[in-house]
Image: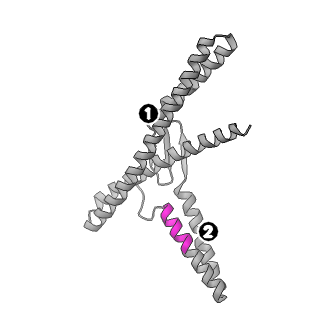
């Protein structure tokens, strides 16, 4: 479970804006103190942004800076397996001259890509949903003074954020790989 001062993208954007304004005021007034404080706020905002996006991926799981660990949608793991098995069949079919094995491998690889993409979308949408529900529920629980529910909603938010960031990381990784492959 995380505390209420959990890093977030929104908090980092607010801190960056506040720092930029304070820095600008310092520049206009000639106050090096305001400039330094403004720059410090901007640096803090950069660190908060990085922390809010920090995830560690291992096959089948994602862990985040909030301490949450989430299991990937089963389609992601199965899709990855099917891509690997399909590529192996395609390779062996190419080596042995078996067009049927090669075609079967190509088809399994493509189906695996679609399956993995479906799992990524499920994780992304589910993560966003859990973040929104956790945020709204936590706010309502905070207003009503229900600390237990507030903690539960914070856990839901953190797990949703972890799931979303894990899917984002895999989606960006795949897009980068495709971009690199298309430029060769």
Q: Where the C terminus falls, by quadrant? A: top right
Residue 43 tag number = 2
Q: Is residue 143 positioned above or below 111 on the image?
A: below
Which image quarter: residue 42?
A: bottom right
**Residue 29 image position (x, y, % from top left):** 64, 89
Tell me the SS state at disc 1: helix
* Residue named by callout 1: 74
**Residue 60 image position (x, y, % from top left):** 49, 36
Helix, strand or loop for the magenta stretch, by majority: helix
Foreground residue among 22 and 142: 22
Q: Is residue 167 positioned above or below 19 on the image?
A: above
Q: Could one spot residue 164 in this view of the protein?
A: yes
- Classify 10 Å Cα crowding around label 1: few (below 14), some (14-19), many (20 and above): some
Residue at image x 72%, y 40%?
Answer: 183
Q: Bounds of the magenta span?
A: 7-17
Residue 38 in the magenta stretch? The answer is no
The residue sitting at the bottom extreme is 29
The answer to whether 29 appears left or right of 155 in the picture is: right
**Residue 133 image position (x, y, % from top left):** 34, 54
């Amino acid at each position: 479970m995380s505390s209420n001062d959990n890093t977030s993208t929104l908090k980092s954007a607010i801190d960056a804006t506040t720092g930029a304004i304070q820095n600008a005021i310092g520049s206009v007034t000639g106050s090096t103190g305001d400039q330094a404080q403004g720059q410090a706020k901007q640096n803090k905002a950069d660190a908060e942004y990085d922390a809010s996006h920090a995830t560690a991926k291992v096959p089948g799981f994602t862990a985040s800076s909030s301490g949450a660990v989430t299991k990937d949608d089963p389609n992601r793991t199965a899709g990855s397996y099917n891509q690997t098995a399909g590529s192996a069949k395609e390779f062996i079919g190419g080596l042995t001259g078996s067009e049927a094995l090669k075609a079967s491998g190509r088809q399994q690889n493509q189906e695996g890509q679609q399956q993995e993409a479906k799992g990524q979308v499920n994780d992304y949408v589910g993560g966003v949903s859990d973040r929104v529900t956790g945020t709204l529920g936590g706010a309502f629980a905070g207003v009503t003074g229900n600390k237990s529910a507030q903690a539960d909603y914070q856990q839901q938010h953190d797990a949703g954020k972890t799931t979303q960031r894990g899917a984002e990381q895999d989606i960006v990784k795949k897009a980068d790989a495709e971009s690199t492959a298309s430029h060769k």
